[in-house]
Amino acid sequence: MTGETDPAASVPARLRAPRAAAVAGILFALLLATSLVLLRRAVPADPLEAGAWLQTRTDLVALALNLVPFAGIAFLWFMGVLRDRLGDREDRFLATVFLGSGILFLAMLFVSAAVAGGLIIAAAAEPTGFLGTAAFVFARAMTYEIMNVYAIKMAGVFMILTSTLALRTGFLARWIALLGYALALLSLFSGRYIAWSPMVFPSWVLLISLYILIDNLRRPGPTTTGP
């Protein structure tokens, strides 16, 4: 009969969704982790440092900052395809907080990177008069606080919501969900006290992305039957 759709026709698209989420998550994790490592190598962790890196390491910092937008695009794709994997099992309340925390994390990440980029431009415009000024101290402290306090906490909320959805729907292994809770608590309460705490979130996204990819590859493909 014309006008009818074969339910099996949508199977390949549904099976491709987990793989797309995994690839996007892996890209996000690698790009953000690379950016964070470069920043850590170039910029001292102390938000009150004098800014010597603006005279010697701006090329490394600029490279790290240029990776952030691409990491953000990959994360948006990761969130979208992850929600597609949940499908009809998605809880509206949890999904709203899940989406909101992810977008807030990205917004804070972008703001922090933009302020850091502004520091580089301001230092290039005033190479002798900018360092040590109140504007420099404020911008440097703002970048540090947004990234190491607020963005990390939003990442922790995102991890908690993802783990909760995983336990309710079973789209991730239970041990990954429980590990997500533990790492989320570390992100929520570590903040500025652990220098490498921003690395927790991309590491966790990489873990669940690899799990989704391997789980998807293990599933048998759709079978076709003759007429």
Image (cartoon, helix red, strand yellow):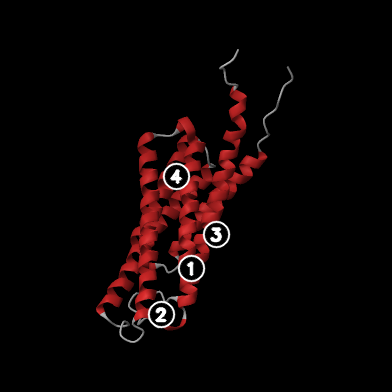
Secondary structure beneath label 1: helix
The residue under the point 54% across, 50% down is 24
Disc on the earlier residue, 4 or 1:
1
Disc marking residue 54: 2
Residue of label 4:
162
Q: What's under tag 1, amino acid-wise? A: Ala
Disc on the earlier residue, 1 or 2:
2
The residue under the point 68% across, 33% down is 221
Residue of label 3:
30
Q: How many angstroms separate mark 2 from mark 3 (CA)?
A: 25 Å
Q: What's under tag 4, amino acid-wise? A: Thr
The residue under the point 58% across, 47% down is 211
Q: How many angstroms separate mark 4 from mark 2 (CA)?
A: 38 Å
Disc on the earlier residue, 2 or 3:
3
Disc marking residue 64: 1
Query: Which mark is in front, 4 or 3?
Result: 3
Q: How many angstroms separate mark 4 from mark 1 (CA)?
A: 27 Å
x, y percentage for residue 218? 67, 40
Q: How many angstroms separate mark 1 from mark 2 (CA)?
A: 14 Å
Query: Which mark is in front, 3 or 1?
Result: 1
Q: Is residue 162 above or below residue 5?
A: below
